[in-house]
Image: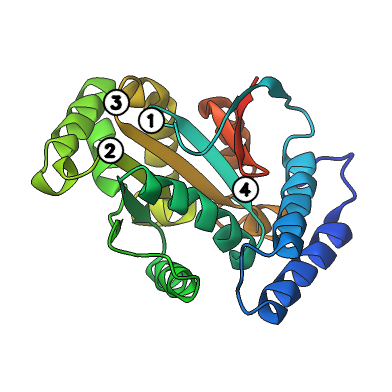
Amino acid sequence: MNFLCNNCNLNADIEDLRKKLNNAIVEKNDNLLDDEIISLSQFLDNLVYECIFCKKKLNNSSKLNLKDIFGTHSSFYYYGKEHLFANMYFYIIEGINNNELIYVSMQENLYVELIEFLKINDVSINHIKFRPVKELIMSNKQGDLIQLKQKISSICLEDEVKKYNGIRWIGQPTYAIETTSQDDFLNWEINLNKALSNTNVSLICIYDAYDYMHEGKVINEEVINKSLDTHSYLLKNLILEEIS
């Protein structure tokens, strides 16, 4: 099963590039600062987004670097865990440098692999904690935007959080949907832009583009289509670009 747009014939190119990236990471001993790895990862970004964003435009005049992102609700579409890790490395490093608490909500086996990957690359994991977004989703379900904003505010007042300048939350929609429901997740996504506005919290949703392009088990066409309408920014080439 294939959910790509009718005009997209890039499946083989994307798969070939994924393999090249994976091989390069092994050959370079997981050195994500290597120019070849960075270049391959960004090429893969562009091909994946060319498929997913075939009917949507990015505002190239409005971009954010990965440092000043509080209040943003962004998305990233990864094709294979190596592609994900290569991008999250830089995303997390910026958060650590800004003394942010990094909350990660993803399938636990993937989280364990991410942590090991970061350790190999000499990233301090003291700032990184596993925290599912389920509590946010259920707050939104129980009390819509008002209760969601209250939940975010209460989290920011927790003793653990007050040690930091803010929160950089990384959430995997696959995990969120599997632990709640698709409807609850999508309804939560609608309110996140307003809920995060004027807070010291950012949240990026990391979508499994491989699942979408080949199987649609969790990340199906409805989830992808609505993701294009509910996020304000897209992580691409290590920059957040505004979604028009």
* Residue 76 x %, y %: 58, 45
- Residue that badge 3 annotates: 199
Query: Element under label 3?
Result: loop
Dot 1 or dot 2: first in sequence order is 1
The Cα–Cα distance between marks 1 and 2, rounded to whole angstroms, is 8 Å
- Residue that badge 4 annotates: 77
The Cα–Cα distance between marks 3 and 1, rounded to whole angstroms, is 6 Å
Q: In the image, what residue type sits under mark 2? A: Gly
User: As rendered, which of 31 and 86 lies closer to the eye?
Assistant: 31
Is there CB contact under 8 Å for labels 2 and 3?
Answer: yes
- Residue that badge 2 annotates: 166
Dot 3 or dot 1: first in sequence order is 1
- Residue that badge 1 annotates: 70
- Residue 172 appearing in the image: no
Query: Element under label 1?
Result: loop
Is there CB contact under 8 Å for labels 1 and 2?
Answer: yes
Q: In the image, what residue type sits under mark 3? A: Thr
Is there CB contact under 8 Å for labels 1 and 4?
Answer: no
Query: Element under label 2?
Result: strand
Is there CB contact under 8 Å for labels 3 and 1?
Answer: yes
Q: In the image, what residue type sits under mark 4? A: Tyr
For the point 46% across and 37% down, which residue is it? 67
